[in-house]
Image (cartoon, rainbow, N blue to C red):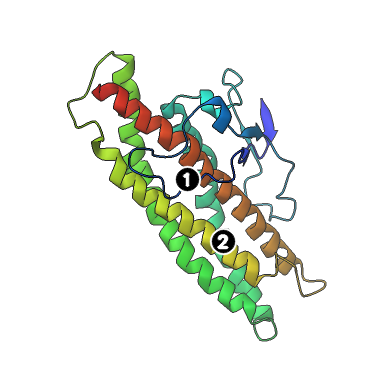
Amino acid sequence: MKFDYGVPEFYVSDPNINHFNSPPDHPGPRLNKSSRRTFHFPKNVHKNAPADLPHSVDIPSRHSLDPYLWDPGFLCDYVVRIHHDYIQKALPVLLAMGKKVTVLHGNTQVETLAILEQMEMLFSDLKLHLFKEEQLIFPYIRSLVCLEKQGKTIDITRDGPLYKPMAGLEEDHGLFEAGMDAIRDLSRDFTVPVQNSPVFSSWYGALQAFREDLIQHTRLESRVLFPKAIALQRKLTA
């Protein structure tokens, strides 16, 4: 089963939910019917992205398209395969395009220099964030899934080792979204100011696509994966 870009888009059913600053006894919204989000595959928002950025993915047909039904281990694999791999491929392309645009248009479009500076800071933090998830958090979550399948429990406190690291990751998510919002504002909502500049159009189109993917990525983790992982850890310590 193939979908154009294969990235889930979530619409918050409760606008009052603040998933970035959940209290310790409530790590994110509960996984019940009232807090679920609509899940669908959006139209191709990457039509202006350069050809060397990824554009489609395959999702096993045996899995429901509702991520609330996926186990945490599969969610980890999905996030890495879809979102992390996309970020790793997109970052050097976006930076190279940005440097080219600033060389060509930086003298007259000074906002491009600020955008490039913001990108470099944001992308540096993103790489560290991905490393933490892939090398520390996700392997632990996968181990919890294996223990559950084996019918075993773990001898740790009920809160366990996930709360503090996940709190840090949640804080990162908020900073990343804010950083991409700053880029959107600097670019006047990704409006290309120079006519007949393919590289400028491609850069802004790719940045817009990157922002939308990043938001979908962080919310999939914050609203689905992390609460599921916390719930599973609690179950195994009961």
Name the outermost residue toward the right: 196
Residue 86 lies, in percent from the top left, at: 55, 47
User: Residue tagged by mark 2?
Assistant: 180
Which quarter of the figure has residue 134? top left
Query: Residue at point 61% right, 26% down?
Result: 65
10 Å crowding of disc 2: few (<14), some (14-19), many (20+): many
Query: Residue at point 48% right, 34% down?
Result: 224
Amino acid on which the number 1 mark rests in the picture:
His
Query: Residue at point 47% right, 61% down?
Result: 123
Name the front one of labels 1 and 2: 1
Comparing 157 with 136, the one in front is 157
* Helix, strand or loop at mark 1: loop
Quadrant of the snapshot with the N terminus: top right
Q: Is residue 36 left or right of residue 229?
A: right
Residue 205 lies, in percent from the top left, at: 70, 59
- Between discs 1 and 2, the one toward the N terminus: 1
Task: Identify whether 75 is placed above or below 127.
Answer: above
Residue 180 lies, in percent from the top left, at: 56, 61
10 Å crowding of disc 1: few (<14), some (14-19), many (20+): some
Comparing 181 with 34, the one in front is 34
Asked if residue 45 shows in the view, the reply is yes
* Helix, strand or loop at mark 2: helix
Name the outermost residue toward the left: 155
Circle on res. 19: 1
Amino acid on which the number 2 mark rests in the picture:
Met
Name the outermost residue toward the bottom: 107
Whether pointer 1 and pointer 2 mark residues with C-beta atoms closer than 8 Å, the reply is no
Query: Residue at point 28% right, 20% down?
Result: 147
